[in-house]
Image (cartoon, rainbow, N blue to C red):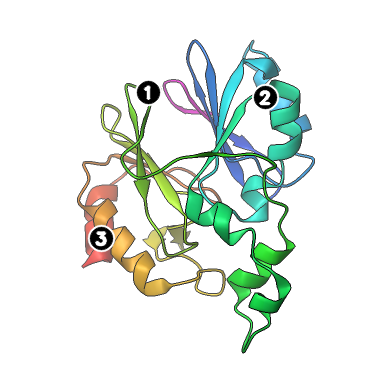
Amino acid sequence: MEIAPDVHAVTLIGSTAFLLVGDEITLVDAGHRGSIRLLRRHIERIGRRLDEITRIVCTHGHPDHIGGVHEIAAASGATVLMHPADMERLRIRAREVFRGRPAPGAIIALLTRAPSAAAPLVDGDVLPVLGGLHVLHTPGHTPGSICLYAPERRLVIVGDILQCVRGAIAYPNSFFTDDMGLARASIRRLASLDIDTICFSHYPAMRDGVRDALRALAS
């Protein structure tokens, strides 16, 4: 589904990914393992090819967002991009996880297969797509969670730092979030942006009144 010009929401296994389509294609998130079949079907439907994907941007290191990275990167030759804090988190060892009371986020990291190679993507980076796609480090859900902001489109892809509950923008799921205090601070940062469209990973994109709703949540 094209939710904005050149921005396609693609339902993969476990989450929604986004195809940012231009002369080359950027894929944001990759679903669970096995998602390549659904992705290929969508790309062929819009008259493009899988090998036109040049980069795969991971909003964070949970398996419903990076499980499909290995197969999609291998098939397309795309570069995988992720914040270093989440790459580091995915190197966690069992003895670190089970020291004291295990945290859900640490257990998830232990059970998640990290990309074999990922280039670092950090706060302030700008990707050459949608007129300049700005990387915002928005930790909290995971240490290396990022959002992607296109100022020209007033559009932001938020990964899981926000969710939608009964039709309203809400804080991320507390069980799967590492640090809710950091998440709230990240949301306050998002609330300062000029935004008309929010693209969620597990809910339909939202447009109506999002700026005011986000500012109300942040306050």
State the SS at label 1: loop
Left or right: 47 as drawn, with respect to 213: right
- The quadrant of the picture occupied by the C terminus is bottom left
**C-alpha separation, residue under disc 2 versus residue under disc 3:** 35 Å
Left or right: 68 as drawn, with respect to 147: right
**C-alpha separation, residue under disc 1 versus residue under disc 2:** 20 Å
Residue at left offset 50%, top offset 46%: 59
Q: Amino acid at mark 1?
A: Leu
Image mark for residue 188: 3
Query: Picture quarter containing residue 97?
Result: bottom right
Residue at left offset 49%, top offset 50%: 84
Decide which of 151, 122 is in the foreground and name it: 122
Q: Residues within 10 Å of mark 2 (few under 14, many from 20)?
A: many
Foreground tag (1 vs 2): 1
Instruction: Give the residue pinned by disc 2.
Output: 42
Question: Going by the picture, which residue comes out furthest to the bottom?
Answer: 100
Earlier sequence position, callout 1 versus callout 2: 2
State the SS at label 2: helix
Instruction: Give the residue pinned by disc 1.
Output: 130
* Principal secondary structure, stretch drawn in magenta: strand
Q: Residue 111 location in percent, x, y?
A: 74, 63
Decide which of 196, 74 is in the foreground and name it: 74
State the SS at label 3: helix
Residue at left offset 75%, top offset 24%: 75
Is the residue 23 above or below the residue 167 in the image? above
**C-alpha separation, residue under disc 3 versus residue under disc 1:** 24 Å
Q: Which residues are magenta?
A: 1-8
